[in-house]
Image (cartoon, grey):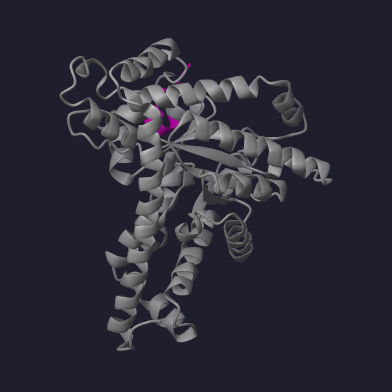
Amino acid sequence: MPDKSANTIQLAHEVGQSIWLDYISRDLIDSGELRRLVDTGVRGVTSNPAIFQSAISGSNDYDASLIRYRAETSDPARIFELLAIDDVRDAADVLRPVYDSSGRSDGFVSIEVNPLLAARTDATIAEARRLRAAIDRPNILIKVPGTPEGVPAIRKLISEGISVNVTLLFSLAAYRAAAAAFIDGLSDYVEAGGDDLGGISSVASFFVSRVDTSADGALDGVSGGREIAGKIGIANAKLAYDEFRRLCATERWQQLAARGALPQRPLWASTGVKNPAYPDVLYMNELMGPDTVNTAPPATLDAFLDHGDVAERVTTGVDEAQAQVARLEELGISLDAITGDLLKAGVKAFADAFEGLLEVIDSKCRELAGAPALD
């Protein structure tokens, strides 16, 4: 029986879903707000360059650190890395009890490799290794994009025991490639003599609302399109989850699980609702289910706490989801084309945010210290 005193985040965990926060900042940690959210039931934190850009540009919380690190280096990318490492390490310490009590399956903080390296496999691997060593906490996920160049990096990092958050997944094909890289990496780890499969974690971050935004735009004005408007993002995610369940039933996975391997859970990302005509907790309500994660921005998390509706739904309506995607194709709209464009746009958006972040750091450092522009 559900605990009637539990909030929606805690009830979601009873269904099998971990709710993470898609936000990080120095104030969130120093004010005790992150600890309060963890007490409420939040079980992880994700970050990206856009989130850090907002946190650093929107407050004075980083000023002392900017002055200190500017005295050490004139490289804005290095200054950002030092700031991010501070935040991620301290957030990981707040979440460490969750990591320990969950059998190392939750309590993670994600940090992204430099998005300018998205097309460079070896450089991504090197950056991930360096970030993991610099943060030096077990409950860290290194975010690697699920691009063709990112997939071999994922396999290599997993084989070395480095936990990975595969980001920017939009298509079923990309999800399958990420899942295969994870399993191949675990097998490589075992073949190399690794004996702690339970210490390697991964999530596959499958983006949702951006798919709806693009699909709805393509459907606008198309005869018969209204019937599936606002449904393709959820349908696409449900089909990815169905792939996950099939994978977990394979003999190869069962053998790894018997040795202590943890599944690479689907993580629903981009779950803030962008269309005001849709319920603000649409993607949280509809994608609830076992062995999943939903990472929500603060406003969406607040809305879910206030009026979320917890029930296992991601396992239902799979046939309907297949029919909705098929109908999209019948109307002459290619989901593969949509997801391909979204991946390119996502990589560019993260790169642009990163470059914008460096400009913010340059500007703030000069403002604080009267220094010349950073190199």
- Residue interval drawn in magenta: 1-10
Residue 188 on image: x %, y %: 76, 42
On whether residue 5 falls in the magenta region, the answer is yes
Name the foreground residue: 331 vs 242: 331
The percent position of residue 93, horizontal first and vertical second, equals 55, 56
Residue 281 within the magenta-colored segment of the rendering:
no
Q: Is residue 40 above or below residue 53?
A: above
Residue 132, quarter of picture:
bottom right
Residue 82 picture location, percent across and down: 49, 70
Q: Is residue 138 visible?
A: yes
- Magenta stretch: dominant SS? loop
- Quarter of the rendering containing residue 7: top left
Nearest to the observer: residue 331 or residue 354 = 331
Seen as rendered, the residue at the extreme front is: 332
Residues 338 and 93: in front is 338
Q: Is residue 183 above or below residue 29?
A: above
Q: How many marks?
A: 0
Question: Left of 215 or right of it: where is 64?
Answer: right
Quadrant of residue 375 in the image? Answer: bottom left
**Res. 7 in view:** no
Q: Residue at x 35, y 26 (%)?
A: 334
For image coordinates 35% across by 73% down, the residue present is 361
